[in-house]
Image (spheres, rainbow, N blue to C red):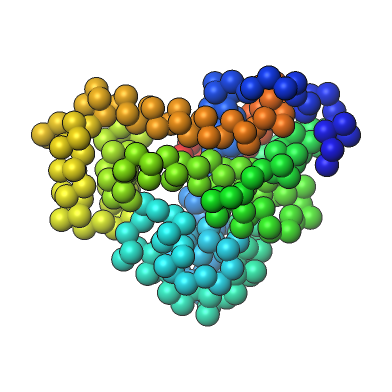
Amino acid sequence: MHLDALPDSSRTDESPIGLDAVRDVSRAVSAAHLFIYLAPESAEEAAGLGVTDRGAAYLAFRSAAMGAVPWQVTLAAFYNFSPRAVRAMAGVWEAAPPERWQAARFRAAARAMRRVGVRLPDDRLAEARALIDPVVAAADHAGKVLAAANASVPLPSDPLVALWQQITVVREWRGDAHLVVLADNGLGPCDCLVLHTATGALPTALARATRQWDDEEWRAATARLVARGWLDAHGALTELGGAVRERMEVETDAHCAALWQPIGDAGARRLASLIAPITEAFEGAGAGRVG
């Protein structure tokens, strides 16, 4: 879609987008996407496909856009999961092909958003799509595996779920970009998870249960971070570690600036406002933030 065909709120000048606006819209996008991983509707839809293991279902739902890839490809794309965790998805494509997993994911999203009463009037939906569609259309997917895969998925007929899928594309784009930053900073899959939990943003018990790094691997990653001065001898985040973690987030924001350039600061912030009711509905229903 050409920008000349879009409403004025979606247009941008040629000035670089500010990283504060990138961070704001990225947070809004992440919050509006993430309910899918905790919604009971996802577990119900997976059970309907014959998979009751929550970990295997998560892996199948999130990687379905890539097609019937072997678990090793999912491991590479997801980065911070251990091989033993991702092996759990063996057999999911025999239970149902990726197209059925993708359709089930859309059904789960639609059912969950209806259950909590997400309300986006037609004019807000149209404005949000007018903002996010050119972002997705102009995105450079080189090295952005999960974003590219999701961008290739045909949008569903349900307008709200179609918006949610476009949100998914840009959410995965930032995730793919973050992996480049992690690798550039020499932060491996287990190390980055240990550092993340040290910030308090991700509960250690949840990270250990879902990513399945064993005690020896976790201790080794912790020791490497202590040696770099990012954690102290007790495994707590140091001032240097906190600064490094924030620097990597800023580097990710900088990487993502080109993604949001088509709509600029005003468009990015307007999109964040337009999609906020998705997150607010889940919070209002007692689901809380899942990111």
Task: Locate residue 115, reporting x and y percent.
Answer: 63, 47
Q: Is residue 257 depicted above or below 207 in this figure? A: above
* The image quarter in which residue 200 lies: top left
Q: Is residue 249 visible?
A: yes
Report the residue at 57% width, 44% height from top: 173
Q: Residue furthest right?
A: 5
Which residue is drawn at the image coordinates 21% and 47% (left, top)?
221
Image mark count: 0
Q: Position of residue 245 (x, y in %)?
A: 34, 31
Residue lying at 20% horizontally and 35% vertically, measured from the top left? 228
Q: Position of residue 143 (x, y in %)?
A: 54, 51
In this rendered view, identify the residue nearer to me: 31 or 181.
181
* Residue 137 place in picture, x, y as percent: 73, 45
The quadrant holding residue 13 is top right
In the figure, is residue 60 to the left or right of 213?
right
Residue 246 falls in image quadrant:
top left
Name, please, the residue furthest toward the left.
Answer: 233
Res. 116 visible in picture: no
Nearer-the-camera pick, 115 or 244: 244
Quadrant housing the N terminus: top right
Side of 200 relative to 70 (left or right): left
Question: On the picture, is 87 further left or further right than 270?
Answer: left
Kindly identify the residue that appears in the image at 53 percent across and 61 percent down: 63
